[in-house]
Image (cartoon, helix red, strand yellow):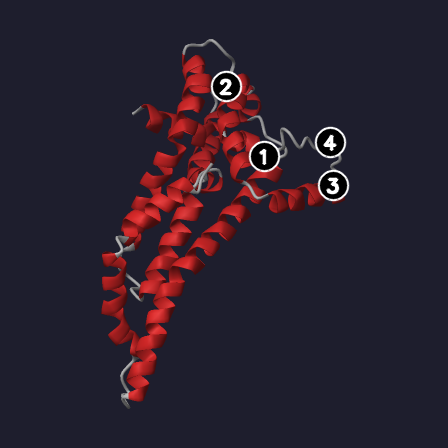
């Protein structure tokens, strides 16, 4: 329950840090307090934050790597709809919560709990909540991808860049493309054994003169059997979890 509350709080508070410039909706609506327009502006801001919450979950957590690898695995097996999208997404979400639980706990203990107890201000709470996620991304981002966005920021005239404490507008996209690249790397290694099975089956069927029989129809049960015999889900999930720092 604590992890879930921490996740919800992070999803609601992190967007203020992700933008280069922020709009103070509270200050904007302060002069209209009690009026219809003030309530409309506040509701619009809340709905906007809630609408981008799934995107925030993808941007700053390990979800991207999990879902890419599981999708490539399904394609390599030759099963376009099995496991179903709902199963893969649910598994990716639970594995994300498992990997990110230390980060969520830090965000809860350092930022959310003191804010609820009114020990710190909202601005300080946002900074404390974002710090564990910043550390997680720094530990897992590829240096080359990070340097790319640092160089792009400097080309646009932003010379005030701290490498030790980078801005989220630099760190988040660098982390995302790093996760996408690593997901494809792991997916490539997963698909290779299935490709070998497809080639062997195709060679055998062609040598037997079965021109009209698609090799994938014959290789499918062998690929599934191979994946089950090596306890593929156990090996894959364990390797993915251990791949995070």
> Is label 3 in a helix, a strand or a loop?
helix
Q: Residue at x 41, y 16 (%)?
A: 113
Residue topped by disc 3 = 154
Residue topped by disc 2 = 125
Q: CA distance from mark 4 to mark 2?
A: 24 Å
Residue 168's label in the rendered image is 1
Q: Is residue 26 above or below residue 240?
A: above
Viewed as shown, does residue 221 lie left or right of 43? left
Q: Earlier in the sequence, mark 3 or mark 2?
A: 2
Q: CA distance from mark 1 to mark 4?
A: 14 Å
How far from the left and from the top, in percent, is residue 101? 38, 30
Q: CA distance from mark 3 to mark 1?
A: 15 Å
How far from the left and from the top, in percent, is residue 7? 39, 30
Looking at the image, which residue sits at the far bottom?
209
Residues 84 and 122: in front is 84
Q: Earlier in the sequence, mark 4 or mark 2?
A: 2
Mark 1: few, some, or many residues within 10 Å (few <14, many ≥20)?
Answer: many
Q: Residue at x 26, y 52 (%)?
A: 231
Residue topped by disc 4 = 160
Q: Earlier in the sequence, mark 3 or mark 1?
A: 3
Which corner quadrant holds the N terminus? top left
Proximity of marks 3 and 4: CB atoms separated by less than 8 Å: no
Q: Nearer the viewer, mark 4 or mark 2?
A: 4
């Amino acid at each position: 329950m604590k992890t879930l509350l921490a996740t919800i709080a992070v999803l609601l508070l992190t967007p203020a840090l992700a933008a280069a410039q922020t709009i103070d909706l509270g200050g904007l609506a302060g002069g209209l307090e009690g009026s219809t327009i003030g309530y409309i502006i506040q509701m619009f801001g809340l709905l906007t934050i809630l609408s981008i919450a799934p995107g925030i979950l993808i941007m700053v957590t390990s979800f991207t790597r999990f879902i890419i690898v599981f999708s490539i695995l399904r394609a390599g097996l030759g099963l376009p709809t099995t496991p179903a999208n709902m199963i893969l997404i649910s598994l990716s979400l639970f594995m994300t919560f498992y990997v990110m639980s230390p980060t969520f706990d830090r965000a809860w203990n350092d930022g959310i709990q003191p804010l609820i107890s009114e020990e710190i201000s909202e601005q300080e709470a946002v900074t404390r909540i974002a710090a564990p996620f910043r550390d997680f991304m720094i530990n897992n981002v590829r240096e080359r991808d990070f340097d790319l966005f640092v160089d792009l920021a400097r080309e646009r005239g932003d010379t005030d860049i701290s490498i030790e404490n980078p801005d989220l507008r630099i760190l988040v996209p660098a982390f995302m493309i790093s996760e996408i690249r690593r997901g494809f790397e792991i997916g490539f290694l997963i698909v290779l054994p299935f490709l070998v099975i497809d080639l062997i089956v195709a060679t055998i069927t062609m040598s037997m003169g079965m021109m009209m029989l698609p090799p994938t129809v014959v290789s499918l049960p062998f690929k599934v059997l191979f994946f089950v015999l090596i306890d593929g889900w156990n090996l894959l999930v364990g390797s993915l979890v251990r791949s995070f720092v």
